[in-house]
Image (cartoon, rainbow, N blue to C red):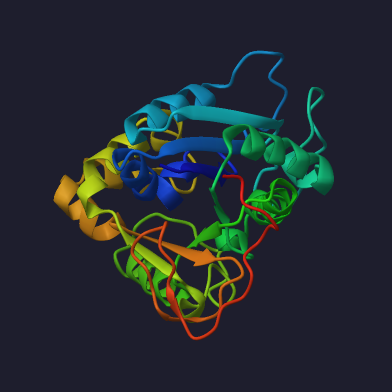
Amino acid sequence: MATVVAFHAHPDDEVLMTGGTLARAAAEGHRVVIVVATDGATGSVGGVEPPRMGELRASATVLGAARVVHLGYADSGNGKILHPDPADRTRFVRADLEEAADRLAEILLEERAELLLSYDANGGYGHRDHVKVHEVGRRAAALAGVGRVLEATIPRDLVVRCLKLVDRLRIPLRHDAVAPGTAYSHRSVITHRVNVRRFARQKQAALAAHQSQVTGTGRLAPVLRTLIRLPPAVFGLLLGREWFIAVGQATPSRVADDIFAAAGVRESRPAVGSRHLR
């Protein structure tokens, strides 16, 4: 059995991007560890744990994760203005790359991780913390010698179609920050498409654990409220697949449905890292 470390920017990202994959890995007997760069709080916390970390642990329990770790950074926010660092920690986007990578690499080595899940080069829809996760994840994997890195993404054409449907149905979702031509990844570079419909109930329950986001006033809140009220079968139809790009692998001729399998390729290139931990 392998140890999978899923590196995310904020609490709730672990569900939206990789929840079904993590539940599937845990159900198959693998050890799952969730690491978040930030605790979702933008201000000082004064030694008190923000509510979103408690929600993350509840979500992790539902997904079957064995451990949750916070790297210690503050949320950088997603507006045009990057506010000063809070008094008690650094915003993740301002974190020194080597320092942040060292923190993550230490966890990877401690866990003897065989697979790291991170984000694509665009950081999904371009959130500054998500882009930083991509950069830190790549560097940490190299430092720790993790031989396999899969970067979570969504096919760009699917995102465009979904946003058009959102507009047509007049769902109150602001998506002006999503640039259709650059967000997420082109379908041709995706190496893994994981079917997680069997874990729709777990993924939906894990999402519901993030009550501050579901009941809040954020741009995604109306959509989250809708998703957790759907019948699990419908939820599975909508969010029953998760996509990844294997770092260092050539453009695939066919995609894999298992994060522990290699996609069919025309040629192979070395994976990230120079040594295997097991």
Q: Is residue 262 above or below residue 98?
A: below
Q: Is residue 65 left or right of residue 201?
A: right
Q: In this view, does 120 lie above or below 82?
A: below
Front-most of 7 and 234? 7
The quarter holding residue 268 reads bottom right
Q: Where is residue 2 in the image (x, y as percent from the top left)?
A: 45, 43
Front-most of 230 and 7? 7
Placement of the N terminus among the 4 image quadrants: top left
Q: In this view, does 278 lie to the left or right of 82?
A: left
Q: In this view, does 237 lie above or below 143?
A: below
| Residue furthest out toward the front | 278
Placement of the C terminus among the 4 image quadrants: top right
| Residue occupying image coordinates x 40% and y 25% | 58
Front-most of 269 and 244? 269
Question: Residue 92, can we see it?
Answer: yes
Q: Is residue 154 above or below residue 101?
A: below
| Residue occupying image coordinates x 64% and y 70% | 270
The quarter holding residue 36 reads top right
Q: Where is residue 230 in the image (x, y as percent from the top left)?
A: 20, 46
Q: Position of residue 232 (x, y in %)?
A: 18, 46
Q: How many labels does the image show?
A: 0
Question: Residue 39, can we see it?
Answer: no
Q: Is residue 278 left or right of residue 230?
A: right
